Image (cartoon, helix red, strand yellow):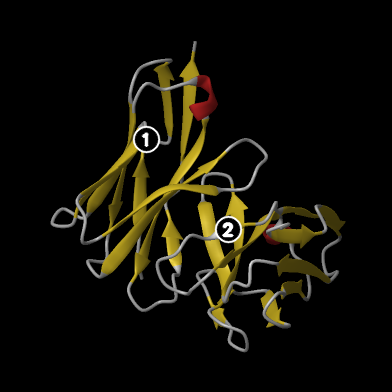
């Protein structure tokens, strides 16, 4: 089955700096790659997603890039703010498996003042 | 709309006891999912239901059973709880099975002693 690896497990940045979280996946058939944000004690929520026919997608301060050849995708957060502090999960979905997402193990992002 | 709701919020069980976690969604979604979240392990799929009347195993189904009662409700049952099932359980739903946003419930924190 699919395997998703996520790095780093923790990341500390100063407010205003950029943060990058990277994920690799194993199954070349995967074609849907969402990112979820989970604040402490809360439920995961989708922040951005990308499909295999697109190389990059942006939404304000957040962007995701996908390299299908290398089987990796990354989340980029620019101009970080304290409210960006949370755990971020990447995930991958294999075509035809009823959106069965395989999640990475998460990155705890801490934005310091 | 309440979105995805789960009951109970917290539960403590003794080894060998049984219980059912309830999940309901009011978004008219076709697909529903049960995940468990353990520290450092991300979210792992236990069971899912691509559409009303169907259920399938996910990554970690052992020790669990599910029932898709109707389009709105998807329950998870632990027949004989074990300490290894101590975890936070999240229910989620999505409009269609493939490549769409999953909406998560608030979670149930289960402790098995």
Observer-nearest of A4 and A60: A60
> Residue A60: image x %, image y %?
36, 34
The residue that appears at 83% across and 71% down in the rendered structure is B18
> Is residue A98 placed above or below A57 in the rendered structure?
below
Task: Classify the position of the N terminus of chain A by image quarter.
Answer: bottom left
The residue that appears at 51% across and 50% down in the rendered structure is B41
Q: Choose mark 1 or mark 2, whichever is in front.
A: 2
In the rendered view, does A40 fall on the left or right side of A12? Answer: right
Q: Secondary structure at mark 1?
A: loop
Residue extending farthest bottom: B53
Residue extending farthest left: A69
Q: Quadrant of residue B90?
A: bottom right
Q: CA distance from mark 1 to mark 2?
A: 25 Å
> Is residue A95 placed above or below A44 in the rendered structure?
below
Observer-nearest of A59 and A16: A59
**Residue B6, label in figure:** none
Q: Chain of mark 1?
A: A
> Residue A7: image x %, image y %?
35, 39
The residue that appears at 29% across and 66% down in the rendered structure is A30
Q: Chain of mark 2?
A: B
In the rendered view, does A39 fall on the left or right side of B26? Answer: left
Q: Which residue is mark 1?
A: A8
Q: Which residue is mark 2?
A: B103
């Amino acid at each position: 089955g699919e395997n998703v690896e996520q790095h780093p497990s923790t990341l500390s940045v100063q407010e205003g700096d950029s943060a990058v979280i990277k994920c690799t996946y194993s199954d070349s058939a995967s074609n849907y790659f969402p990112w979820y944000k989970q604040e402490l004690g809360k439920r995961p929520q989708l922040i951005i997603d990308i499909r295999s026919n697109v190389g990059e997608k942006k939404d304000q301060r957040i962007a995701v890039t996908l390299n299908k050849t290398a089987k990796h995708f990354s989340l980029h957060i620019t101009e970080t703010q304290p409210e960006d502090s949370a755990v971020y999960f990447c995930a991958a979905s294999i075509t035809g498996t009823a959106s069965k997402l395989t999640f990475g193990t998460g990155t705890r992002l801490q934005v310091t003042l | 709309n309440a979105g995805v709701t789960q009951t109970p919020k917290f539960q403590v069980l003794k080894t060998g006891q049984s219980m059912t976690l309830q999940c309901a969604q009011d978004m008219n979604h076709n697909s529903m999912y049960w995940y468990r979240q353990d520290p450092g392990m991300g979210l792992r799929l236990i069971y899912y239901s691509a559409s009303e009347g169907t259920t399938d195993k996910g990554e970690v189904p052992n020790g669990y059973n599910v029932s898709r009662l109707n389009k709105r409700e998807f329950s998870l049952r632990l027949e004989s709880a074990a300490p290894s099932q101590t975890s936070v359980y999240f229910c989620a739903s999505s409009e269609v099975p493939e490549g769409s946003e999953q909406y998560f419930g608030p979670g149930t924190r289960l402790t098995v002693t």
